Image: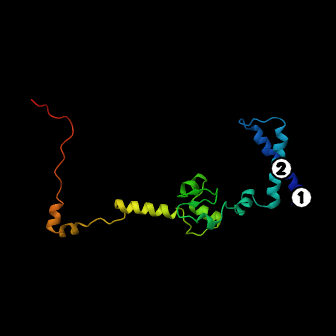
């Protein structure tokens, strides 16, 4: 394709896009905005046709610059500093979801290793301790273990007496 043909195609496509934009009933534009929009459309179409790649692919190849270094983001045990905005978080999952990212996308975006943590170490330990305290992660006792328990233990573990029923008290005569 020659440059004249490419230029003509870019002008025609930009014109068609501008006409489509103006024909949208939700678009409110002054006459002074139309030439600027047409110029912007032409530059975008010409940029796409000259590079041979869509603009999205060109932008995707550029890696975003992290707000802090990876080493600094993991410097504290109490929080992890986000590479997106440089703010500290105990856990990054909700923050990443707000930016439309998954942990894998985040790691890929900034070139992080697969074992880069999403939760601060101190926060993870506190959650682990709480889970162990309430009994999560323990295996249930088997029925055979209950039968093998000594009679003294089984006597102490008898079912408690039933609680009194709730409701109205009977009227005394």
Q: Give the vertical position of 29 relative to 122 (above or below).
A: above
Label 1 – label 2 distance at C-alpha: 15 Å
- At x 14%, y 66%, the residue is 152
- At x 78%, y 36%, the residue is 29
Task: Label 2: state its secondary structure.
Answer: helix
Tag 2 residue? 42
Quarter of the image with the C terminus in it:
top left
Q: Give the vertical position of 99 relative to 16 (above or below).
A: below
Q: Quadrant of residue 54?
A: bottom right
- At x 63%, y 60%, the residue is 83
Q: Are marks 1 and 2 in contact (CB under 8 Å)?
A: no
| Earlier sequence position, callout 1 versus callout 2 | 1
Q: Residues within 10 Å of mark 2 (few under 14, many from 20)?
A: many
Residue furthest top as drawn? 173
Quarter of the image with the N terminus in it:
bottom right
Q: Residues within 10 Å of mark 1 (few under 14, many from 20)?
A: few
As drawn, is 122 to the left or to the right of 165?
A: right
Tag 1 residue? 3
Tell me where residue 23 appears, x and y as whole percent.
Answer: 76, 38
Task: Label 1: state its secondary structure.
Answer: helix
Q: Quadrant of residue 71?
A: bottom right
Tell me where residue 155 appears, x and y as whole percent.
Answer: 14, 62
Tell me where residue 15 appears, x and y as whole percent.
Answer: 82, 45
**Closer to the camera, 74 or 111?**
74
Tell me where residue 92 appears, x and y as whole percent.
Answer: 55, 58
As drawn, is 69 to the left or to the right of 143?
A: right
- Choose mark 1 or mark 2, whichever is in front: 2
- At x 35%, y 59%, the residue is 134
**Closer to the camera, 145 or 58?**
145
């Amino acid at each position: 394709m020659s440059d004249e043909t490419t230029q003509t195609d870019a002008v025609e496509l930009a014109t068609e896009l501008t006409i489509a934009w103006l024909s949208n009933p939700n678009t409110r534009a002054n006459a002074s905005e139309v030439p600027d929009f047409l110029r912007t459309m032409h530059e975008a179409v010409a940029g796409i046709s000259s590079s041979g790649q869509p603009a999205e692919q060109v932008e995707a190849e550029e890696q975003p610059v992290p707000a802090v270094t990876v080493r600094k983001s993991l410097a504290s045990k109490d929080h992890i500093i986000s590479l997106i905005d440089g703010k500290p978080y105990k856990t990054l999952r909700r923050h990443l979801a707000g930016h439309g990212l998954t942990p894998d996308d985040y790691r890929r975006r900034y070139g992080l290793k697969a074992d880069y943590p999403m939760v601060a170490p101190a926060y993870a330990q506190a959650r682990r301790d709480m889970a162990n305290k309430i009994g999560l992660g323990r295996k249930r006792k088997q029925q055979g273990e209950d039968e093998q328990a000594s009679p003294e233990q089984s006597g102490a573990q008898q079912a408690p007496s039933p609680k009194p029923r709730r409701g109205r008290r009977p009227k005394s005569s």
